[in-house]
Image: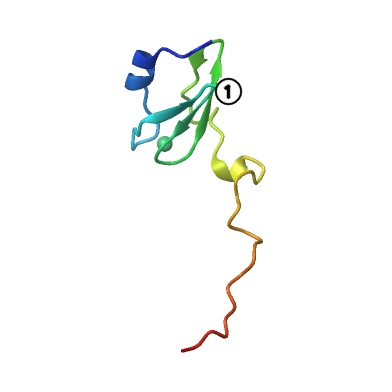
Amino acid sequence: MALDPQLLEILACPDTHHAPLTYDADAQTLTCTECGRIFPIRDGIPVLLLDEAVRPADAGGVGAGDRGGVSQPSGAEA
Ligand SMILES: [Zn+2]
């Protein structure tokens, strides 16, 4: 079920910044472009509630590619 593009245009994050949302058709979610919260879409209806949103930090570490990698060597003094 595709979300109406016109509906997507008027949707905004319920947080104070009211940033636009990015629609993920595969996951059926809306992602805030400002705070990164992920809002579910249930039966084609976006659930734009902060209580229902998944924050990136709560998403089980998915996409946290910057942590635990190779750290910069600290001995590179000029
Ligand atoms: Zn937001």
Residue 62 appears at what percent x and percent y? 64, 43
Q: Which colour scheme is used?
A: rainbow
Confirm whether residue 13 shows in the render: no
Horizontal relation, residue 48 to residue 65: left or right: left
Horizontal relation, residue 5 to residue 26: left or right: left
Task: Dividing the image into four quarters, tell me where ligand 1 lies.
Answer: top left
Instruction: Say which quarter of the image contains residue 73.
Output: bottom right
Instruction: Say which quarter of the image contains residue 28.
Output: top right
Location of the N terminus by quadrant is top right
Please state which amino acid type lies under the numbered disc 1.
Asp
Q: How many marks?
A: 1
As rendered, which of 49 and 60 lies closer to the eye?
A: 60
Horizontal relation, residue 67 to residue 50: left or right: right
Eyeballing the image, is 54 above or below 27?
below
Q: How crowded is mark 1: few (under 14 residues within 10 Å), some or many (20 or more)?
A: few
Eyeballing the image, is 2 above or below 48?
above
- At horizontal 34% and vertical 32% (from top left) the residue drawn is 18
- At horizontal 49% and vertical 12% (from top left) the residue drawn is 2
Horizontal relation, residue 30 to residue 70: left or right: left
- At horizontal 59% and vertical 25% (from top left) the residue drawn is 27
Residue 24 appears at what percent x and percent y? 51, 26
Confirm whether residue 40 shows in the render: yes
As rendered, which of 36 and 4 lies closer to the eye?
A: 4
Residue 70 appears at what percent x and percent y? 64, 67
Q: Which residue lies furthest to the bottom in this view?
A: 78
Q: Name the residue under label 1.
A: 26
Residue 36 appears at what percent x and percent y? 47, 39
- Secondary structure at numbered mark 1: loop
